[in-house]
Amino acid sequence: MMEGKMYVRVTRKGQVTIPIAIRRALGIREGDILAVREESGRVVLERVGLPEPGEPVGWEAYEELLRELERVRGAWR
């Protein structure tokens, strides 16, 4: 776990940049998908493990992925 605080600025579009030290420590790369939620007044990001192409997934997981994709697409419109 990294010590100390790091500060980031939220852009007009609500975007933040995760500091490179944190990305490296957690192995977060461009294109990775992160889930975001509010927890006790904090913003929490977690890496989402997507199945490999061709790997079977449950119907519920598939529907959840489709909902998330639609939500993200809507944010870009």
Image (cartoon, rainbow, N blue to C red):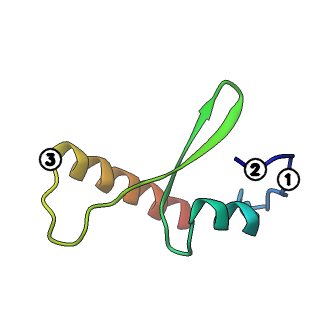
Q: Position of residue 5 (x, y in %)?
A: 86, 47
Mark 3 surroundings within 10 Å by alpha-carbon count, few (fewer than 14), some (14 through 19), many (20 or more): few
Q: Position of residue 12 (x, y in %)?
A: 78, 61
Marking on residue 6: 1
Return the residue nearer the eye: 1 or 35. Answer: 1
Q: Position of residue 59 (x, y in %)?
A: 15, 47
**Quadrant hosting residue 48:** bottom left
Question: Dot 1: what SS?
Answer: loop
Q: Residue furthest top?
A: 40
Q: In whole angstroms, how far apart are the C-alphas of marks 2 and 3?
A: 37 Å
**Which circle's residue, 2 or 3, is located before the other in the chain?**
2
Marking on residue 2: 2
Q: In whole angstroms, how far apart are the C-alphas of marks 1 and 2?
A: 10 Å
Amino acid at the residue labelled 2: Met
Q: Residue at x 38, y 58 (%)?
A: 70
Is 5 displayed left or right of 30 in the figure? right
Q: Are marks 1 and 2 in contact (CB under 8 Å)?
A: yes
**Quadrant hosting residue 44:** top right
Amino acid at the residue labelled 1: Met
**Quadrant hosting residue 25:** bottom right
Return the residue nearer the eye: 67 or 41. Answer: 41
Q: In whole angstroms, how far apart are the C-alphas of marks 1 and 3?
A: 39 Å
Return the residue nearer the eye: 3 or 76. Answer: 3
Is 61 displayed left or right of 23 in the figure? left
Amino acid at the residue labelled 3: Trp
Question: Dot 3: what SS?
Answer: helix
Mark 2 surroundings within 10 Å by alpha-carbon count, few (fewer than 14), some (14 through 19), many (20 or more): few
Q: Residue at x 39, y 53 (%)?
A: 68
Marking on residue 59: 3
